[in-house]
């Protein structure tokens, strides 16, 4: 087993790698605040641009809601008109089918009265005959 803490026991290729890593100069990394240098004009431009984008999105959403509200109001008005038409049609039907309207109908006046003596042959049949 190779002990890396003592240089005498290192492998011949490993000593080469260790010496290459030691020769590299140390690079000090700069913090993010040093690498990004934004001017006041750029910052103002970004703030105005973001404000405009947010305003545009708000207006688009408000416009969409207003359009949907208008469509709903139109549909509600159409529904109320159809309900009124339905009520008028039902009143017309009930007027036509009323007893007085049926009695006054000329077709019904021409009908013959029912026979007086009707006897059924059996309970399970629908045949009937008249007694004379």
Image: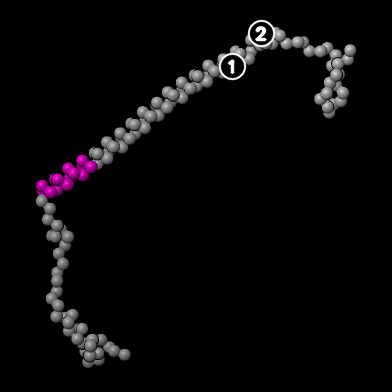
Secondary structure state at the residue bearing disc 1: helix
Q: How far, Cα to Cα, is label 2 from label 1?
A: 18 Å
**Which residue is drawn at the image coordinates 14% and 60% (left, top)?**
35
| Image coordinates for residue 102, horizontal then vertical, percent | 66, 11
Give the x, y percent position of residue 27. 14, 71
Quick one: quadrant of the C terminus?
top right
Q: Position of residue 92 (x, y in %)?
A: 57, 15
Q: Quadrant of residue 131?
A: top right
Displayed quadrant of residue 69:
top left
Which disc number belongs to residue 27?
none
Is residue 6 visible in the rendered structure shown here?
Answer: no
Q: What element carries label 2?
A: helix
Q: From where the camera sits, is residue 44 visible? A: yes
Residue furthest to the bottom: 8
Front position in the image: 25 or 95:
95
Is 59 positioned to the left or the right of 49 in the image?
A: right
Q: Which residue is the site of mark 2?
A: 106
Quadrant of res 75 = top left
Q: Report the predominant secondary structure element of the magenta stretch.
A: helix
Task: Bin the neighbour count of mark 2 within 10 Å (Cα to Cα): few under 14, some 14-19, many 20 and up.
Answer: few
Residue at the image point whose x is 18% and y is 80% from the top: 21
Residue found at x 14% / y 57%: 36
Decide if residue 106 is on the left or right side of residue 57.
Answer: right
Residue 47 in magenta?
Answer: yes
Part of the protein shown in magenta: 40-53
Reading the image, the residue beneath label 1 is 93
Q: Earlier in the sequence, mark 2 or mark 1?
A: 1
Q: In this view, does 38 lie above or below 84?
A: below
In the image, residue 81 sits, relative to residue 108, either above or below, namely below
Q: Nearer the viewer, mark 2 or mark 1?
A: 2
**Labels 2 & 1 near each other (Cβ < 8 A):** no
Q: How crowded is mark 1: few (under 14 residues within 10 Å), some or many (20 or more)?
A: few
């Amino acid at each position: 087993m190779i002990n890396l803490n003592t240089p005498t026991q290192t492998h011949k290729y490993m000593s080469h790698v260790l010496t290459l890593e030691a020769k590299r100069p140390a690079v000090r990394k700069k913090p993010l605040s040093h690498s990004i240098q934004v001017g006041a004009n750029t910052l103002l431009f970004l703030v105005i641009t973001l404000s405009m984008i947010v305003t545009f999105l708000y207006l688009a959403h408000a416009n969409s809601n207003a359009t949907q509200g208008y469509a709903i109001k139109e549909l509600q008005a159409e529904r109320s008109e159809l309900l009124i038409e339905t009520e008028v049609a039902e009143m017309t039907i009930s007027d036509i089918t009323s007893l007085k309207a049926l009695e006054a109908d000329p077709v019904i006046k021409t009908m013959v009265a029912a026979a007086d003596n009707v006897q059924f042959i059996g309970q399970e049949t629908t045949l009937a005959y008249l007694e004379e």
